[in-house]
Image (cartoon, rainbow, N blue to C red):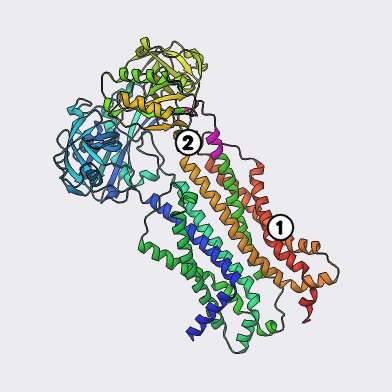
Amino acid sequence: MLKHYWNTAVRNLTRNKLFTFLNVIGLSLGIAIFLSLTGYINYQFSFDKFYKDGDRIYRINYFEDQHGQSILQSARTHDRTALLVHEYAPQIEAVTRLYNEKAYVFTETTRIVDQDVLFVDSSFLKVFPIKLISGSDKSLIPPKAVMISQSQAKVYFGNEDPLGKTIYMNERLPFIITGVFEDIPANASINFDFLLSWSTQSFYGWVSKDGDFKTPWTFTFVKLRENVSDIQSVNKALTAIANEHITTLKNIDHTAHYELQSYQDLHTSPPLSGEVKPSTNKILLYTLASLAVFILIAAWINYINLSLARSLERADEIGVRKVFGASRMIISGQFLLEAFILSFVTFFVGSGLYMIFTGPLSYLLFSNITFLPNDGLLWIKYFVGFIVGTTLISFYPAQFISKFKPVLILKNKLGSGKGKINLLHQGLMVFQLFLAVTIVGITLIADKQVNFMRKFDSGFNTQQTITLRAPASTNSDSLRQVRYQQFRTEVIQNSAFQSGTSSQNIPGQEIRFHDEAVHAVGSANIKKQSYRVMWIDEGYLPTFDLTLISGRNFREKEARSTCLINETAAKALGYTNPTDVLNTKLITSDQKQFTVVGLIKDYHHESVRKPVDPILFLYRHPIEYGYYSFKVLSRQGQFLEDLQKIWHKHYPNDTFTYYFMDRFFEDQYQSDKLFSKLLNLFSVLSIVIASLGLFGIASLSIVKRTKEIAVRKVLGASVSTILILISKSYVKLIIICCAFAFPIAYYLTDQWLKGFTYKIEISWWMIIVPGIIVLATTLVTIAGLSIRAAIANPADSLKDQ
């Protein structure tokens, strides 16, 4: 018996090729997108979950306020904080400091730039239990000690044992390898291949052995003792450190406090100042998860509509089965078996599409996206969930079909489709169209915002600017600036280049230094805030086409006593008219005085998501790392080859690493472009799936109204009249769904836009156009069915009456 039902189910699916094809396409696309997005979302939420007891690891964040107003929110703390943690907070089991760098690491045979390096305390392994291949928790105690990842040990030393060997960093600082550890997974907020002993810094005199409270510059991580759940009490204990030891706070009328933040939440939490890498917006991930579920639900609704549409075509089969004694359970079971087979096939087709979307065609749909590696158990859960879900969804059409009365079927007198059943069909269709209109509306506004940001006048020009990573081999070299000036002079002599500059940071990158104690001499303004401190030279303004509103540029002879500021900084100092700030003397936190000689027009150093920060520009050459940027007159010709030759002439031991600044600056908008791209994909899919469902319900409606249409034609109705008759009900559905979709799309996009300092205004047409797009798609979808019904011979429909 079961074999008979199986054969019948297969025969019905293969015989009704259009029905099967539409369902396979709709469900397969739904499951493919669902798998793709959940793979991406699961990967993002998997960050930092691989350490043992990872839920006990926390980062200490530092906050500074003035009269309740936030001045600084930093992911970094003062380097002395870690030395006092155990004294003030006994709930803490272990503590370690981290300081990250991108270093030039080399041996006599292998040289690699931009290696991920961490200076860490010897207690690092007690907080972060990385897996050691060799070495111990004492390997990071002596100065100039380094532990290296397994993969990098292979790169630098091949199959040789790296222990005891010497490796060099930056300006040829030697480090002895004291241990090897397993590679850190890519889904880590802090990536590293080299761990350098913290004692190295005091050994070379870079920092004090006992630390200080001058400025927050290092990361501090702690591991709580087991069963410690009162985080607020730990925060209170840590804040006592700030209150009792940061003596400068009272002088500038500031208060400060420390807060713990779970290490496992770093990747999806709002970023603070000084983060190692950008975080991922948790709201974005939840939005994508919701859309993935909605797409799958829309595909299931599409299946219901198509099944109901096809039910009338199988009415004769059902009538004959009932006449020969088939029960409703048997008939329902037949349709449920067909649903099971269909869901089984579509899951594997959808999985195949997922493999293609995320594999060979990833550059089209999911470029620059990483997915969580396939987990067999998770896939089994998805498989079972999809099969069960599709089978349960099919229960309603199966029950509906099994209710057909054989007498009415065989007399060809099935109902006209009015009543509760028809209302449910229309409700399902309205929901599908509602999703389509909402997603298209959100997509349109998101696209406008992303394009607005990309084309926004940031106040400077990056179009013809190339930037080089400054040479690491000359870090801390007393002649570093002289060497750079010789290099720049030779570059500028080349006719392809117009100007050049050195800077600690470049546009599109967070400014490294900040100062919360900047104030004007003799000013009555007691308000303080965090000023970004930018190290540049006299070539910075012409190279990036910054506008000098008043005053002048730097002069090298008086560079150490003068500064430039932007308009926002002038206002922060209390000047309502920014130009009045000229010749004002400023005092910084280290009690140095600078005379303001120039006022720079505000520009967006980072994404327009953020407001313009007050910036203090000092004439300084970066003593380590930094960037050398050059204005190029034209990108035609061999300017890049010429620049590389000059570089290797002056810096033979450093790799030539360059960026085109327009691309570098636009990289800030990767997450926004990804969001926009995924929404565009969702828009197309939601319309496609809604169209498939619409095709099904329109087919059902036209089959039910075949005789009505025939009678109207006999009575003289034209083809256009019948087209309007059939289409007007769908136009009503569109109007109903738009009434719900428009306010929801407006609300969601308005909430999203609140995350931007500079944003578009939502115009009425941005809300109306999605409805027009979906309406046009709807009319095109049903046009073929309507025309075919309108031109059919009425005699064929009425011959049995």
Give the crowd class for mark 1: few <14, some 14-19, many >=20 residues within 10 Å.
some
Whether 584 is drawn above or below 758: the answer is: above
- Taking the image as shown, residue 308 lies to the left or right of residue 72, namely right
Q: Is residue 297 visible?
A: yes
Residue 718: give x, y in percent of width and height. 83, 64
> In the image, what residue occupies the spot 34% across and 37% down?
276
Whether 627 is drawn above or below 438: the answer is: above
Closest to the camera, between mark 1 and mark 2, is: 2
Residue type pointed to by label 1? Val
Could you say which quadrant of the image residue 42 lies in? Answer: bottom left
Range of magenta residues: 450-464
* Quadrant the C terminus occupies: bottom right
Q: Is residue 686 magenta?
A: no
Could you say which quadrant of the image residue 189 lies in? Answer: top left
Tag on residue 68? none
- Taking the image as shown, residue 66 lies to the left or right of residue 320, namely left
Residue 495: give x, y in percent of width and height. 45, 20
Residue 386: give x, y in percent of width and height. 47, 66
Residue position for label 2: 666
- C-alpha distance separating marks 1 and 2: 42 Å
In this view, which residue lies farthest toward the right?
Answer: 716
Tag on residue 731? 1
- Taking the image as shown, residue 444 lies to the left or right of residue 136, namely right
Upstream in the sequence, badge 1 or badge 2? 2
Residue 190: give x, y in percent of width and height. 31, 42
In this view, which residue lies farthest toward the bottom?
Answer: 324
